[in-house]
Amino acid sequence: MINSIITGTGSFIPDHEVKNSDFYDASFFDEKGEKYTIPNEDIVAKFKEITGIEARRYANENMVTSDMATIASQRAIEGAGIDPETLDYIIVAHNFGDVPYGHTQSDLLPSLATRVKHNLKIKSPKCVAYDILFGCPGWVQGVIQAHAFIKAGMAQKCLVIGAESLSRVVDPHDRDSMIYADGAGACIVEAKEGDEQEGILSTAAVTHAYDEAYYLHWGTSYNPEVESYEHYIKMHGHKIYVYALTNVPAAMKSCLDESGVDIHDVKKVLIHQANEKMDGAIINRFFKQYKTEVPEHVMPMSIHRLGNSSVATVPTLFDLVLKGKLENHSIHEDDVLIMASVGAGMNINAIVYKCPGALK
């Protein structure tokens, strides 16, 4: 049978670290445009208590999203040991394109996938490059699409990238700006023949857009003195929290049940690094559906030091765990993983993956 196997991974984590204490001098306003009167030290302390975030990484001034995507891709290609000219697809998941430092306007022409292909110096016109906009679950969705191409006989090798520079599109007067970060993660998905099923075992994806479409949206600054033509990423945090807890565990269960894997055989759950409290609640509800306790060390977290880099969180987390860079976490041959994400759209997706070994 033909399996979809991840043969190489790579990530790019910017050097520039922004600590929580760097927000002590910020001017925060509420949604009504009124300045908070409580000390910023208290605002930041409450923020850390809820999200778990102590620091985040921002891209250097001379870098844009496609630059980070290219570096992560080069590392994934090297790990897989393939010739980039043999790639059939380059799929780049992002939300805001290349945003130059000091600006909020997105640059999407040409597509980021085209820019990455150009940066990698791939000459083959049969290597099709395109972007997907799917909110934070974009990289997981890209892997799902690569899997579909392979199962349909349309591809042998796909490069899937999640990259974002959210620091360029946040409202500095919004407390939520402290959540967001920059980074990139990538992987090579290859078609491999085998006697038994491994690699991607099952997938799931849903979109809720009747009431939920604008839980994350583009809006003006909370500071009434900022020009109204300037727009930034905005979110209804509580609604997203309730939405995620209600729907993500069910989507994960649907995906696991389809795979035929027993819940006790799941070794790791790599979930979008959005909010430590929310992610913990999702994992608890997921395992509760099977009337079992959450295993120790099942949920690696990178959000504490890296923040929420949107589409980059899951592939970066995967790469860090594979390469032994997160304490108490490792992945071994035949381990079963669940990758899951939730974000703008509102979109949710999941993958059940059985590791074949020899990942780099």
Image (cartoon, rainbow, N blue to C red):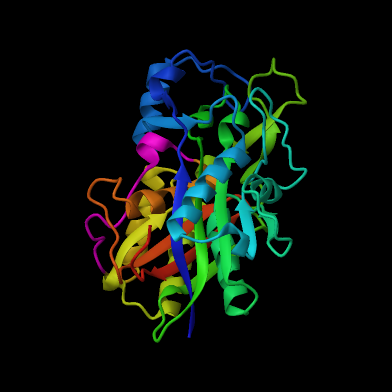
Looking at the image, is 59 positioned above or below residue 147?
above
Looking at the image, is 143 positioned above or below residue 17?
below
Q: Position of residue 150 (x, y in %)?
A: 58, 74
174 or 80: which is nearer to us? 80
Q: Which SS type dominates the magenta stretch?
A: loop
Residue 298 among magenta residues? yes
Residue in view at x 42 percent, y 83 percent: 194
Residue in view at x 48 percent, y 64 percent: 350
Residue 334 visible within the image: yes
Q: Is residue 300 left or right of residue 1?
A: left
Q: Position of residue 30 (x, y in %)?
A: 57, 25
Residue 240 visible within the image: no
Residue in view at x 69 percent, y 57 percent: 129
Q: Is residue 291 left or right of residue 269?
A: left
Q: Is residue 274 left or right of residue 107?
A: left
Q: Position of residue 297 (x, y in %)?
A: 24, 54
The span picked out in magenta is: 292-308
In the picture, the quarter occupied by the C terminus is: bottom left
